[in-house]
Amino acid sequence: MKFIDEFRDGRVAASLAHRIHADVIPGRSYHIMEFCGGHTHAIARYGLPDLLPASIRLVHGPGCPVCVLPVGRIDSAIALARDAGVILCTYADVMRVPASRRQSLLTTKAAGADIVMVYSVQDALSVARAHPNREVVFFAIGFETTTPPTAAAILEAERAGLGNFSVFCNHVLTPSAIQSLLDSPEVRKLGRVRIDGFIGPSHVSAVIGSRPYEFFAEEYEKPVVIAGFEPLDVLQAVWMLVRQINEGRCDVENQFTRAVTRDGNLKAQALVGRVFELARTFEWRGLGDVPYSALRIQGRYARFDAEPRFGVRYEGAPDHKGCECGAILRGVKQPEDCRLFGTACVPENPMGSCMVSSEGACAAHYTYGRYRRDTAAARRRAAGAS
Ligand code: SF4
């Protein structure tokens, strides 16, 4: 399969691993954050840490859109579906994220609320067309990759005069999250993780380009390599970062040239700029309130904005006691550091958001991690004995 098989070739992977081993400087350690959940998934699925020298530590970042949605936002969506009488359209993963009072969108649906699982915002538009006498709200989440389709849907609803469609907007921005990791007040509370370089997201960068990362390379002196989601993409990005770190360079390099340019997709950016504007602040799970890190619908499209339309109120709410998702999303802890990992919290019964989506660090570790072979059974035995 073109652009898939050649990026999963075992012999090339071995050769890349050999080059990485040859290039690491003895006595030096390398802390590399993969921002994006797609990379976290690939790293766990293909066992990439096993190919790397022990001196390279891959640190998970907050790049899973389901994971970073705070409990309060799920609570607001539940209130919309339960109390405002709307048909709420949302993605399957979001339905399983735990909210306050042991609720989730799934339990709310089971209790009778009209919640529909969709694969895209276009599906939500179809629901609105099929139910002209009901209010239909799309629970929009995601980074820059999913924002242009939401903008297009709002414009389509306007053109079609679809008065019963609106969007509960939770679209967030990658560069603001990276900046928050490097210098937000939460660093003092949750600790700072050492980051020597970033593996930059691929799909997001296809939209926004590589230019926004130049700020981090210049101002924070952190090298960035934008990489695809296949195992060879990630290995090559690690090798490129090792070489930058060795040479003391802080550049933005693009491993994913097959889809990413410096300027990105200008048409998609124009579409987003037409419908959305920067929200002054947005709460992220694990990062707290991050200024100018999310998008809101512009006033001229207010009738498609579910928040004013249904008087959605936002209240922050804590994660499950004992859940370490916040620290994991900042990279200061690993899934195995959470005492609920693999015992009370498993993909079939997630206690936190990082165990829900396949891009979440806990789900990736649980599904593909070596821990299953050697520590899971011991943990379960210990949990059963206590
Ligand atoms: S194992 Fe579960 S409870 Fe613990 S951090 Fe991960 S998602 Fe949260």
Image (cartoon, rainbow, N blue to C red):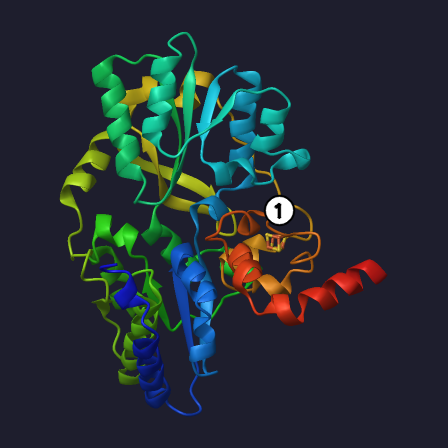
Q: Is residue 281 left or right of residue 334?
A: left
- Relative depth, front residue between 241 and 11: 11
Q: Residue 344, how many percent across, how many down?
A: 70, 52
Q: Quadrant of residue 196?
A: bottom left
Residue 247 visible from this viewpoint? yes
Q: Quadrant of residue 307?
A: top left
The quarter of the rendered structure image containing the C terminus is bottom right
User: In the orientation shown, which residue stands out farthest toward the right?
Assistant: 385
Q: Residue at x 23, y 24 (%)?
A: 155
For mark 1, give the secondary structure.
Answer: loop
Q: Quadrant of residue 71?
A: top right
- Relative depth, front residue between 268 and 273: 268
Residue 300 visible from this viewpoint? no
Q: Mark 1 = which residue?
A: 348
Q: Residues within 10 Å of mark 1 (few under 14, many from 20)?
A: few
Q: Residue 76, how many percent across, how many down?
A: 53, 29
Cβ of mark 1 under 8 Å from ligand 1: the answer is: no
Which quarter of the rendered image does ligand 1 occupy? bottom right
